[in-house]
Amino acid sequence: MAAERLKEKQEVTQKVQQAKKDYVEKEDKKVSTEAAEAVNMVVEVIKHLQEKNKEKALETIEKVLGKLEVLIARDPSLQLVPVNVQEQVVDFPGTVDDILEIKKVVKELIDEGELQKARDIMLNLASELDIFVTALPIGTYPAAIKVIIPLIEQEKYEEAIALLVEVLETLVVEKIVIPLPILRAEQAIERASELTKDKEDANKEELKELLEYAKEQLLLAQALGYGKISEDYKPLLEEIEKIEQILDTDQSTKNIFETLKEKLQTFMGGFNKVKEPTQMPKASNSSQEEQQQTSQQQQSNS
């Protein structure tokens, strides 16, 4: 029989849901109304151009530039201005053993050259809240808009539309990844901290359940590859082991979760930022030479 994940306590579930909501709302508050309206107005300009309504198009572009100038005047150092926030949750339902088994299958598929099949499986190996922030590049946007004005005045509508579409495509989409297993571990320990804050004799059985759940979630996060798997988890698991030993004795429960709570908060803080895009590895010079030789041989054979 396959192992099952531990059940999450209701109090922890509530905390996790609130934490997820807080992460999204934090990014929502950064959205600039003026910038969002400016982007929507660019879409309106395209509509006016499709209708060959030159006056309306020019009038709307003036409003766009006005809003952008206000933003720049407020903060000349601005580079990216958030205009929209969306969220998506991907949550792998299995255990660490399931992940290890899937990794074996993926490795076999890669070795067999079945990259697309491996990719489809790998996409499911995630447990995270993804926050997508669409941002306007304020430094280049006004200049790109101004280039279109002469085209509209000359009634070169198709060219103007094409350039405006390019302008809209310069919007930047940034991604913030919040690993759910780490978030759940953090909130479980937060709950344990509440139960032991300045309390000498908290219910040790309940504390053991919360600690075991947090440990399971951290091992799950480690197996899924969140963070530096060889560095980030060692101090957390060592701290959990210390608490486990305390809970198996008659020692006081007073504030025994505070250090672990602080370490988890610091760990989580490292994820609450824009994720840097993964750089594709470059072929070594020797690999490139081999590819060239293979290509040359194929050409000579043909």
Image: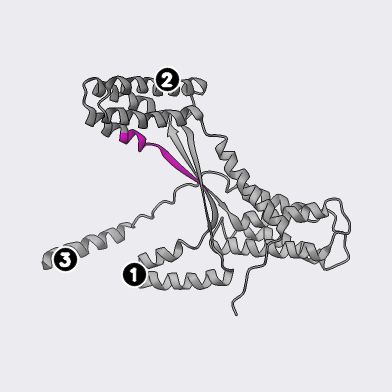
Snapshot quadrant of residue 186: bottom right
Q: Nearer the viewer, mark 1 or mark 3?
A: 1
Quadrant assignment for the C terminus: bottom left
Q: Check the image and report above or below for 172 versus 99.
A: above
Give the image location of residue 242, x and y in percent.
76, 62
Residue at the bottom extreme of this rendering: 1
Q: Check the image and report above or below for 284 versus 86.
A: below
* Residue located at (78% from left, 53% from top): 193
User: Does the stretch in magenta take in 173?
Assistant: yes
User: Does the stretch in magenta take in 17?
Assistant: no
Q: Is mark 3 on a helix, strand or loop?
A: helix
Q: How is the image coloured?
A: one colour
Tell me if label 3 and label 2 are in contact, CB under 8 Å. Answer: no
Quadrant assignment for the N terminus: bottom right
Q: How far apart are marks 3 and 2 (CA)?
A: 60 Å
Q: How far apart are marks 1 and 3 (CA)?
A: 21 Å
* Residue located at (88% from left, 65% from top): 250
Give the image location of residue 97, x and y in percent.
57, 72
Q: Which of 291 and 144 is in front in this view?
A: 144
Amino acid, disc 1: Gly
Q: How far apart are marks 1 and 2 (CA)?
A: 54 Å
Q: Residues within 10 Å of mark 2 (few under 14, many from 20)?
A: some
Dot 3 or dot 2: first in sequence order is 2
Q: Is residue 62 left or right of residue 221?
A: left
* Residue located at (45% from left, 63% from top): 122
* Residue located at (21% from left, 65% from top): 294
* Rendered image: mark on residue 298: 3
Q: Which of marks 3 and 2 is in front?
A: 2
Residue at which label 2 appears: 66
Residue at which label 1 appears: 113
Range shown magenta:
165-176
Amino acid, disc 2: Gly
